[in-house]
Image (tube, grey):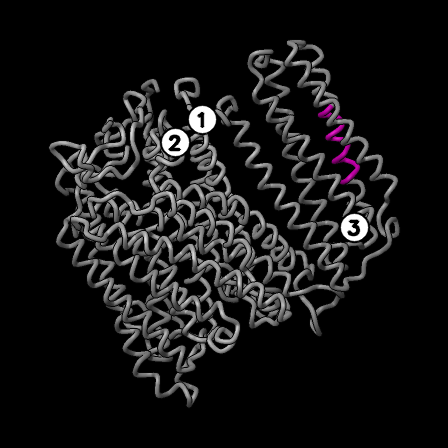
Amino acid sequence: MEQALAMEDKAFKNIAFGKLGIWVFLIIDGLSFIAILIAASYLRANGAPWPHPGQALNVPLTAFNTFALLLSSYTMMNALEAVRAGDQKKFIRDLSWTLFLGVLFLSIQAFEYRHFIAEHFLPSSSIYAGCFFGATGFHGLHVFSGIIFILYVLIGGLKGRFNAANHLRVEILTLFWHFVDLMWMLVFTVVYLL
Amino acid sequence: MPEHRQSFITKYIFSTDHKRIAQQYLFFGIFFLLWGGLQAMLLRWQIAYPETEVPIVGKLLFPENNGILTPDTYNQVLTMHGTVMIFWAVTPLLTGAFANFVVPLQIGAADMAFPVLNMISFWTFFFSGVVLLLSHYGPGGSAAAGWTSYPPLSTPVGGIPGWGQALWCLSLVLMGTAVIMGAINYITTVIRLRAPGMTYMRMPLTVWGIWLSSILNAIFVPIIAAGLIFLLLDNVLGTQFFVAGGKATVKGGDPLLYQHVFWLFGHPEVYILILPVWGLVSDLLSTFSRKPAFGYRVTVLCMGVITVLSALVWGHHMYVAGMSPLLGKSFMFLTLLISLPTSIFFLNWLGTMWKGSLRFDAPMLFAMSVVFVFGLGGLTGLYMGVITSDMYLHDSMFLVGHFHYTLAASVLMGSFAGMYYWFPKMFGRQMDPFWGKAHFWITFLALNYVFFNMLGVGYAGQHRRLFDPGAYDFIKPLMPMNRQISTAAFILGAAQGIFILNFVIALLRGPKAARNPWESATLEWTVDYPIPHGNFAAQPVVKCGPHEYSNPKIKGKDWASQTEDIG
């Protein structure tokens, strides 16, 4: 169907539906993140007690976690390059690395949550805690859906569904995964570092 | 698109055909329209005849109170009336039914860009409606903090027991998700799937309206979703983002934050609902006046300008919440600025009809009534936009009259115009023209009687959201007028029976509709009912604008379809 409908507009002529759709979605989703982070900053400026960086949260551990997520963006990029070049083996390998790093990120976050709950640092204990759980939880949901998406693409990849000519799903996944990574940078900065 | 076999389930339930999904949205929207309408009747009964037994339905709905509306139930009905009407009645009709049906057909596409997403969007919407309806039966009944659900009333410290508020938040987040999926679909479809020759400036104004409203949806629904998730956390996990003062156990929460987030979405929401109506009214006025839409490009420009401005004026909903004078004046200035583009395309509407060969079919009558009621809604909007008059009028029935003129009257009349107009293409049959007009006149007169007098009692000082206005001495003289309003409201409600009967009878055994009963120029009228999955047998090529009526170059008839070459 896509090929049958010729378009005369130059601007979006060569962009696939799925890619245009995911871009629109990422803009929308980014606005949700920004709304949450601005709300958190507003509450802080409004006088909610806000601990100094490192006082309440384990910054070194999360910095390591951030590094893992960044690394996963790198392996994701490599996987896309590989599938573009038609290198199936490298594609599967790099995608698996991405999956591993994504799961590692979530596990460390779950470990952190468990630790906080054991220490009675709950969403209801302070506005700061609420913002922390709200923002990181919202982001965690994104990582989780990203992992599901990677699994889906990985299974497709193992069945040999993607090649140099046909890899739109991989491109969409890459866009989404980079976006999740970028949003983590914002969340990490606002919630952990500032 | 190749023919493929469809089972009953994939054809009628989980269909990915945009026309089928449009029909599903239509029935869904009409159901909630009636549900919200019934709630309005209950409210009007209580206001006119406080604490007496509601006739006919009272014993059925409130058997434990002998059919009398209690204050708690009144609050719930008031909350659900607003919520249902805005989010589950007119939203599915406009951005669900019409948008789904019209956008691919009018731009000459085979289907939406993402048919499966479209199907998921409808079923998410459906599920959100189920959650909302079930909240009536949860512990404590449904939400009762008003459709705006301002904290602290809507949080656990507000004193309203039960699950209602949490379920309200949940169902709205689900609904928002469905709307976002729809918005992604419409934006992509319009950008990528226009037929050859269908440039942006040849798109029918309906498509323009829906597209701009989808962009607003895409930008602002995520923001209210974020806010509602936080309100949900306040209700479920015991956080206190929106709680301040003596009841707060942790420091730093702020109810005003919620108001900002709510109206940052809430004001664009007004335009999300009205933009599709403006678009379809512009098209309908042109079709039934047999004249090109006056100032097409200017109308598009004005709709675009309003889309941008609508994002910058949310503060005018919060003058009464207290605000720095500088901020208040800025919001006031931007608010009043909107009246410029609005007036311009209002004049364009009049220009379209001016000296045209008007055909007073039911869709045209409804479209013309939108011009009238939206004019009143817009003019009363000026009172609300100016800080000094808003301070007095904001919490009165005047405000209720104002936003019912813009939302209930304009959007509802526009939806009816659309339903009468596209019914022949949607279902292949014709609705009865006489009863269509009868429905119009009763609705139009009763509706104006209701809302105009609401402006009146509000100006005289009647507070909105009162359970029993007769309990206050200064409102007692207004009670006869309240009873008149209620009587007119009951007539308005009963008149919808005409529509439903007309709709159902036409659906079952109405006369078969011709291919193009309104002699309209846009692309959806070039295909025969039933439109197959994939819409057009051959890719249509667009050669002229959407409003080629009474062009002297056309011989033998007074209109040219968009696929005709008129040289």
Q: Residue at x 43, y 32 (%)?
A: B189
Residue B187 visible in the snapshot: yes
Q: Nearer the viewer, mark 3 or mark 1?
A: 1
Instruction: Kindly identify which residue carries mark 2.
Output: B199
Asked whether the beta carbons under mark 2 and mark 3 sit within 8 Å of each other, the answer is no
Q: Chain of mark 1?
A: A
- Residue positioned 14% across, 43% down in the render: B510
Q: Is residue B47 magenta?
A: no
Q: Which residue is mark 1?
A: A9
- Residue A117 tag number: 3
User: Residue at 71% of width from left, 25% of height from top?
Assistant: A99
Q: Position of residue B406 (x, y in %)?
A: 38, 61
Pick the residue in front: B474 or A127: B474
Q: At numbered mark 1, what does the secondary structure look like: helix, strand or loop?
A: loop
Q: Is residue B163 left or right of residue B85?
A: right
Disc 1 + disc 2, Cβ < 8 Å: yes
Chain on which label 2 sits: B
Residue B59 visible in the displayed image: no
Crowding near the residue tagged with mark 2, few <14, some 14–19, many ≥20 C-alpha atoms within 10 Å: some
Helix, strand or loop at label 3? It is helix
Between the residue at mark 2 and the residue at mark 3, the CA separation in whole angstroms equals: 57 Å
Q: CA distance from mark 1 to mark 2?
A: 8 Å
Work out whether B256 lies above or below A159: below
Query: Bounds of the magenta span?
Result: A98-109
Mark 3 neighbour class, 10 Å CA radius: few under 14, some 14 to 19, many 20 or more:
few
Relative to the observer, which residue lies in front, B545 or B460?
A: B545
Using the image, determine if residue B159 lies above or below residue B126: below
User: Taking B465 as reference, is B2 above or below it?
Assistant: above
SS at mark 2 in the image: loop
